[in-house]
Image (cartoon, grey):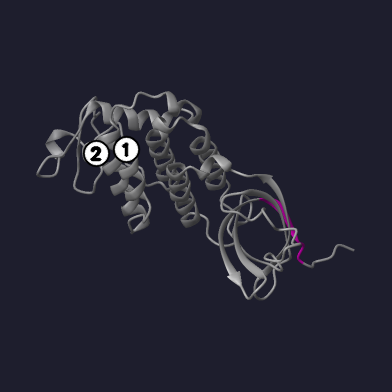
Amino acid sequence: MVSGRPRRVIADAVVWKRSDFRETSRIVTLLLREHGRVLTLAKGAHRPDSPFLGRLDFLNEVRATISPEREGLRLLLRAELRRERRGLRQATRYLAASHLAELCDFAMPAGRAEPEVFDLLVGGLNLIELCPLAALAVVVLGLEVRFLLHLGALPGLDHCADCQRGLGELAFVGEASGLCCREHAAAPRRTVGEATLLLLRSLRDQPGKTWPELAVGGVGGAVPLCGGWLAAALERRGRLRGALFAQLR
């Protein structure tokens, strides 16, 4: 006879938010590929002999064992450390990783699987940790472009949003922040130059591992465009993004 009782979950996870619970325990939010965002209680995590010590740091990758669903918090029964991201201890990389995790947290509701978002998070953290610091702005923009593409919120980069004519090497910002031809540009016309268009199209189309080698032209034009698109999609401004790109200038 097959039991209908819920089973514990054993899965790879990224450690996201943590907060203290009473004197010795912690509430830990995990991001899981097949289960989305899961809130757990790590009992005794603050004790000197706890098996959780050193494993529940921000953005660590762990093999998590979580109790079956029940009323109240689920228990984090075990966390086997798979990857400790020491490269993210550098301040600007840490800020970039936090920005990416904040985006992915938004797109991973509690209990709903979002494997594409989880893969974007893990792959993005790899790039942020290992890419040359000079390429970090391009990498972050690429991750934002892919995130917008996943949400269905990336405007067309090849055709006018109003008349569908090809944009070629020059575009303008339309009324709804989409890209359009000169005839349908919102007043006053804001030009999107050739270098910015080329960069955005490359980030959309090329594998992430190639982003650090892309020419950096167009970054200055792409930063406010992607920021506006993200704000429209999320209905808020990211609290970390402005500080990040101020450091990356």
Q: Crowding at label 1, few (<14), some or many (≥20) Cα neighbours within 10 Å? A: some
Q: Quadrant of residue 5?
A: bottom right
**199 left or right, relative to 184:** right
Look at label 1 and name its amino acid.
Answer: Gly
Q: Nearer the viewer, residue 80 or 164?
A: 80
Where is residue 185 shown, x and y percent of the image?
15, 40
Where is residue 242 shown, x and y percent of the image?
32, 49
Residue that lies at the very extreme toward the right in this rendered image: 1
Disc number for residue 156: 1
Look at label 2 and name its amino acid.
Answer: Leu
Name which of mark 2 and mark 1 comes first in the sequence.
Answer: 1
Q: Is residue 67 above or below residue 55?
A: below
Can you identify the residue that label 2 sits on? 179
Q: Which residue appears at 61% of the width and 73% of the height?
A: 21
Where is residue 197 shown, x and y percent of the image?
28, 30
- Assign the C terminus to one quadrant of the image: top left
Range covered by the magenta-colored residues: 6-12
Q: Which residue appears at 35% of the width and 30% of the height?
A: 201
